[in-house]
Amino acid sequence: MQRQQQGFTLIELVIVIVILGILSAFALPRFADLGGDAREATRDGIVGAMKSASSIAHSKCLTSSDCEASADESTVSLENQTIQMVYGYPDSIADGIGQAAQIDAPTASAGTSGGTITYNVDDSADCQITYTAASEDTDTGEISSPSVATSGDCN
């Protein structure tokens, strides 16, 4: 007469527990700190929104008779919002790029017209986005495009 096995032996259960322990020791650190990844993704999203909003506002300025791309101050209207422009691109003040990109950032350092504005992701001074408005070279009269730069470590 043959006897049928009705469960796992103690050795089999111990081996499975050991294997799961080893796997969790390697996998847990990868998932322990997702906050840094979230802040970095937020920063990348804000950068993309700024670049897109800048291009859209610039296109609107080029097609609008109310906006002069060569002027150091003008406005365009996007989605019923008045966007302050400088040399045909959104300005570096809250009514400029911040409103054009619809950024509701927790903190932003004060921007000056034609200067720069810095947004801090999640109130972290280490994870920043800096928008530099378009400017005119006084020697050549050429207008530079705005720039968006990131700095710091979001982790």
Image (spheres, rainbow, N blue to C red):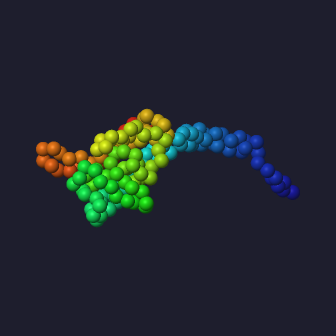
Q: Nearer the viewer, residue 90 or 37?
A: 90
Residue 15 appears in the figure: no
Q: Residue furthest top?
A: 125
On the picture, is 123 further left or further right than 54? right
Q: Position of residue 116 (x, y in %)?
A: 32, 41
Q: Position of residue 11 (x, y in %)?
A: 73, 42
Residue at 68%, 41% (x, y): give it: 17
On the picture, is 116 further left or further right than 140? right
Q: Nearer the viewer, residue 46 or 14?
A: 46
| Numbered-mark total | 0
Q: Residue furthest front?
A: 66
Task: Classify residue 82 by image quadrant.
Answer: bottom left
Q: Where the N terminus falls, by quadrant?
A: bottom right
Q: Position of residue 89 (x, y in %)?
A: 30, 53
Residue at 32%, 62% (x, y): give it: 60
Residue 72 appears in the figure: yes
Task: Classify residue 83 by image quadrant.
Answer: bottom left
